[in-house]
Amino acid sequence: MRNVQTVTGPVPADQLGVILPHEHLIVDTYDVRRNSEGVLLERAMMVDEVALFKKAGGETIVEQTVYGLHPDPEGLRDISEKTGVKIIAGTGFYWDMYHPSWLHEMSVADITKRLVAHITVGFPGTDIRAGFMGELGTHHRRITPTETRVLQAAAKAQIETGTPIGTHALFTEIGVDQLNILEAAGADLDITVIGHCDTNRDLNYSRKLLNRGVWIAYDAVGQLDKQTDELRAQSITTLVREGHGTKILISTDIAGRSRMVAHGGQGYGYLLIKFLPMLKSAGLTEAEIKMLTQENPQRFLAGK
């Protein structure tokens, strides 16, 4: 199996173990949201939190903090080196509200060049390379011209580098619109995932995407304001029984202080400790759970 680029160097995909494919470790949304919930900047605390994930059996985290959310690749490398957990850094741009002003003036070609540089050379001022493009955001009701160019550029960068793509698609069926843009721009749907599908409770939305060959992520596990985890487990089981199991990723998309163990939350180990037993209760076998937590994300992240 191919190597996957982590913040400490390439690792064979089949050595990534149990993976959380959509998380945030260092993130800062204060300048947009104006509250402290989305501010995670304390490296020492995050080392402890990631160590707890490792203790629960986790081995790899895909960190999807991109432009607009204040990424810190060097911080990620520090956390990885201190915990032994492999971290894959994403590159790209979040949705329009978070875009830097200069992005609106950039062409698809300009954005593509920047993404490719992060993947092949490294983030500015570092030798740390991205191993993923995402989370690429759009508004949940419409896609702006700048968001469209970002998606198109990611598809072009994927053609050039074989790097997987992941999106941010909340509540509505906006993921279909994202998919239309990505597919028209040449994206490889075998290494493209539409995110947050579990924030839309209509299983037909998930089926609509899966039937077109793209991956889907049920990556808001533990976010009970969207739906219950018991219902998530039932929905995943239904989709697996319908033959879609090999195109589903699961994660918790943690990006808030209240979800840290240090602040009374259940942390990055929640999916392994609490949600996997729910999947088993819903009818999944150990082999199917291994598929969701190890085989699927390893194959997806290996890219092309």
Image (cartoon, rainbow, N blue to C red):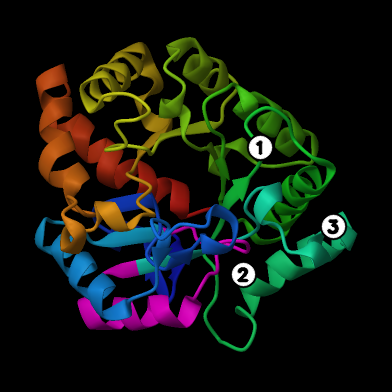
Residue type, numbered disc 1: His
Q: Which residues are magenta?
A: 63-86
Q: CA distance from mark 2 to mark 3?
A: 22 Å
Q: Which residue is mark 2?
A: 119
Residue type, numbered disc 3: His
Q: CA distance from mark 2 to mark 1?
A: 25 Å
Q: Left or right: 99 with respect to 231?
A: right
Looking at this rendering, what residue extends furthest in the front direction? 34
The image position of residue 145, as x and y in percent, is 84, 43
Q: Is residue 287 magenta?
A: no
- For image coordinates 79% across by 63% down, the residue present is 101
- For image coordinates 34% across by 30% down, the residue present is 225
Residue type, numbered disc 2: Ile
Sequence-wise first label, 2 or 3: 3
Front residue of this view, candidates 287 and 100: 100
- For image coordinates 31% across by 22% down, the residue present is 236
How many neighbours does mark 2 have within 10 angstroms: few (below 14), some (14-19), or many (20 or more)? many
Q: Which residue is mark 3?
A: 104
Quadrant assignment for the N terminus: bottom left
Q: Nearer the viewer, mark 2 or mark 3?
A: 3
Q: Which residue is mark 1?
A: 139
Secondary structure under badge 3? helix
**Above or below for 164 versus 101:** above
Judge whether residue 67 can be spotted in this image: yes
**Quarter of the image where one finds residue 78:** bottom left
**Quarter of the image where one finds residue 36:** bottom left
Sequence-wise first label, 2 or 1: 2
Q: Left or right: 27 with respect to 106?
A: left
Secondary structure under badge 1? loop
